[in-house]
Image (spheres, grey):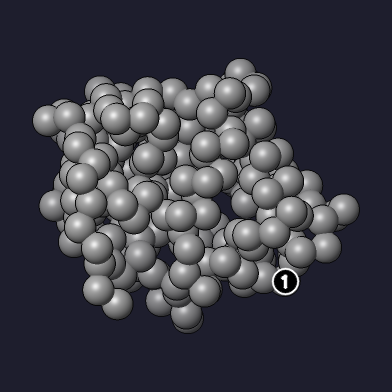
Amino acid sequence: MKMEPNNFAAPASPIVEQATESDIPDLIALWWDAFGGDFIRRIYPQTPDGRRWLERAFAKHLGHPPEPGKPETKCLIARSPDTGRPVAIAVYHIVPAGCDPVQLSWRVRWPRFDDLPDIREDVLAGFFDPMDKTQTYLLGDRSHIHLEALGTMEAHRKRGYATALIKWGTDLADDLGVECYLDASPAGRPLYEAHGYFEQDVSAVVKKQAGPSMVRPRKH
């Protein structure tokens, strides 16, 4: 499909900031635009139930301070200089050393969905369970920065937003002296490699993945 040119501008160095609860409607629009493929729409259906689930997820990420010994979630955005609306998003989890693996499960990270028929547990488990296994296998109980999601609206890509959001995480990891972890899409792997991430062999714990598991070593 031919891409139409767009006239959106981006600052030389996009500004990364924490999203707020007032951003939630725009975050959902951003999420659906950035993660709009047929496969990913099964995970995040673009339906009223899918909207409600994302509303709960963002409210959970934004509305609760971290508890001692549990991961701290950061929902970060970069805004369009033209509209002021979020056009790129990253969801990070700052995992403390010795964290109970149960706290890393997607069932803890993501909100309840038992009253939302469009959100199917078998689909979610098939997507998230292998990533939970590889994260535990590769990082154990060591402190690390987990980049769970990174996306940019299609009309705003190739303007440095994703780079700025990745750099936020790698800078924090370097300040803390810890590793970074993510599960990449095949298309996103080169960008992560450019920021020091390396693909890992996880065949001992999973046989099939949606994308490669990657770790960025801590700086000594």
Residue 171, position as x, y percentages in the image: 23, 29
In the rendered view, would you say 97 is above or below 28?
above
Which residue ends up furthest to the bottom in the rendered image?
Answer: 207
The residue positioned 52% from the left and 46% from the top of the image is 29
Residue 49 appears in the rendering: yes
Residue 121, position as x, y percentages in the image: 74, 65
Query: Taking 213 as reference, is 135 left or right?
Result: right
Question: Considering depth in this image, is 196 or 14 the residue closer to the camera?
Answer: 14
In the rendered view, would you say 215 is above or below 184?
above
Q: Residues within 10 Å of mark 1 (few under 14, many from 20)?
A: few
Residue 102 appears in the rendering: no
The C terminus sits in image quarter: top left
Location of residue 186 (image quadrant): bottom left
In the rendered view, would you say 190 is above or below 103?
below
Q: Amino acid at mark 1?
A: Asp
The residue positioned 82% from the left and 56% from the top of the image is 116
The N terminus sits in image quarter: bottom left
The residue positioned 52% from the left and 39% from the top of the image is 27
Question: Considering depth in this image, is 97 or 14 the residue closer to the camera?
Answer: 14
Query: Taking 94 as reference, is 122 left or right?
Result: right
Q: Which residue is mark 1?
A: 122
Location of residue 47 (image quadrant): bottom right
